Image (spheres, rainbow, N blue to C red):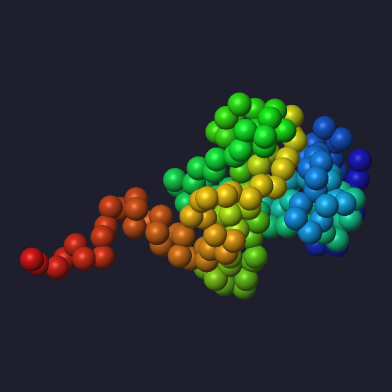
Amino acid sequence: MKLITTDYGDIQYEKEDLILFSDGLFGFTDLTEYLLICLNDEDNSLLILQSTQRPEISFAVINPVLLCPDYSPVLTPEELFSMGVKDSEDLSYYAICIVKKDLQDSMVNLKCPLAINPQTLKGMQVILEGSYYQFRHRIGDLLQDSENTESGSETNADIET
């Protein structure tokens, strides 16, 4: 099959490549079929979720673990059942991004990730209730927090007591 997009050119795909969101995405409930497109073979950190029903609709998405290594969403039993899995860890997650000219100022929604069953390619956008994740996190802040966590540095490490 061939999809002609305004931003990404012609895309060849098979029906088996489609990710199906039976309830659509928030604000786009009528759009249920998407492709996950890697824009750069060498760097797959930022991807495009492209609607096949309306080629002018696409979303920049990112694996939230790249920004927040301890990201661990917990879905409700009903959501897990709907996705055909027993555990939240059986799913792949993507966060929708608002991309700005300066990537550091771009925002990412960690509160409402896209959960995808990699075996069935069934997807669902969920709202993580009771979590500290927000609708808008600045990517630059998340990257800085991630670097601080990895290095084990603390802001007051050089202060004498």
Q: Nearer the viewer, residue 122 or 83?
A: 83
Residue projecting furthest to the left: 161
Q: Does residue 29 show up?
A: yes
Q: Residue at x 60, y 58 (%)?
A: 109
Q: Residue at x 84, y 46 (%)?
A: 32
Q: Quadrant of the C terminus?
A: bottom left
Q: Residue at x 81, y 41 (%)?
A: 22
Q: Nearer the viewer, residue 60 or 10?
A: 60
Q: Quadrant of the N terminus?
A: top right
Against 133, residue 124 (above or below) is above
Please indicate whether residue 140 sits to the left or right of residue 128 in the image.
left
Q: Position of residue 104 (x, y in %)?
A: 52, 68
Please indicate whether residue 139 sits to the left or right of residue 18 in the image.
left
Counting labels gives 0
Q: Residue at x 44, y 45 (%)?
A: 70
Q: Position of residue 140 (x, y in %)?
A: 48, 65
Q: Which quadrant would residue 146 be assigned to in this image?
A: bottom left
Q: Position of residue 115 (x, y in %)?
A: 66, 42
Q: Nearer the viewer, residue 11 or 92?
A: 92
Q: Position of residue 124 (x, y in %)?
A: 72, 43
Q: Does residue 10 show up?
A: no
